[in-house]
Amino acid sequence: MTVRWASYAALGDSFSEGLWDFADDDVDADRQDRAVRGWTDRLAQILSERRTAEGHDPLRYANLAIRGRLLRPIVVEQVPTALAMRPDLVSLVGGGNDLLRLDADPDRLARRLETAVVQLREAGSDVLLATGMDSHRTPLMRHTRSRVAVFNTHIWSMARRHGAYVVDLWGMGVLRDWSMWDDDRLHLTSDGHRLVADAALVALGLDPQRDDWCDPAPVPVRAGLAADARWVRDHVAPWVNRHLHGRSSGDGRTGKRPHLDPLP
């Protein structure tokens, strides 16, 4: 099927920045400083390769996503930049960091997201959204499940109203396989990002790279209390500490691809 988009901009947080799908083999480098790829980069590369195979110019691609970003900064900072670029396709995925907070209001978040969707659609861009993932098997994280479910319902509704595409992460049974997740239990591994790129292709009406992109996952093995304790110590506690002090893992960072440049 023909790829009709000549340019693509990815907006969002760590999920769209690509944590922890490392783009290099320098395992000795600090992981915070290593280049990451992620599902958006993978999607862009596939779209570009299919375009060139059809005799078209390579896809022009920008990635403005920054780890740790809440939805408001994504909408206030990244969306206007994307509007100025006027890309054919924009992926806008945010709100996950907001929904981790106990006082999160999924209805208010949805209104903010929909405002951005309307702006992008009125500017002529196709918009790709994504639902939140189902966290019912994850300790602590399962308490966000009801908020995520409400937010997801809003996403499907706004997509219908405005003609947007949706990556159905909630429905991807394969993501219930722990091997798809980093030790922090918040970010995908390279295999997970690869499958989400396939899910995005399907959402856009294109063929996936792999037919097993949405296969049911095996019954997950319980991590155990010792593993849960390490997770809380190494990942949850630092996140809470940053939150209490008003800091973010993305402080001082900028989007890794700030311009719509052709892919090689």
Image: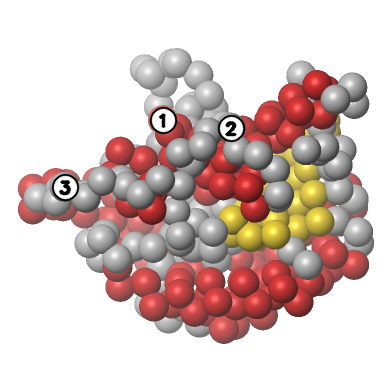
**Crowdedness of circle 2 by 10 Å Cα count: few (<14), some, many (20+)?**
some
Mark 3 or 1: in front is 3
Q: Nearer the viewer, residue 212 or 118?
A: 212
Residue 81 shown left or right of residue 189 in the figure: right
Under mark 1, the amino acid is Arg
User: Local crowd at mark 1 within 10 Å, few (<14), some, or many (≥20)?
Assistant: few
Element under label 1? helix
Q: Position of residue 87 (x, y in %)?
A: 86, 47
Front-most of residues 212 and 258: 212
SS for callout 3 = loop
Q: Earlier in the sequence, mark 3 or mark 1?
A: 1
Residue 50 screen position, x and y as percent: 76, 28
Report x, y in % for residue 128.
70, 56
Residue labelled with disc 2:
209
Of the numbered discs in the image, which one, if any, rests on residue 69?
none
Q: Is residue 114 visible?
A: no
Which amino acid lies under the numbered mark 3 shown in the image of this protein?
Answer: Val
Return the residue at label 3. Answer: 221
Front position among marks 2 and 1: 2
Disc number for residue 31: 1
> Where is residue 221 drawn, in percent x and y?
16, 47
* Corner quadrant of residue 139: bottom left
Q: CA distance from mark 3 to mark 1?
A: 26 Å
* Residue visible at 75% across and 58% down in the picture: 127
| Sequence-wise first label, 2 or 1 | 1
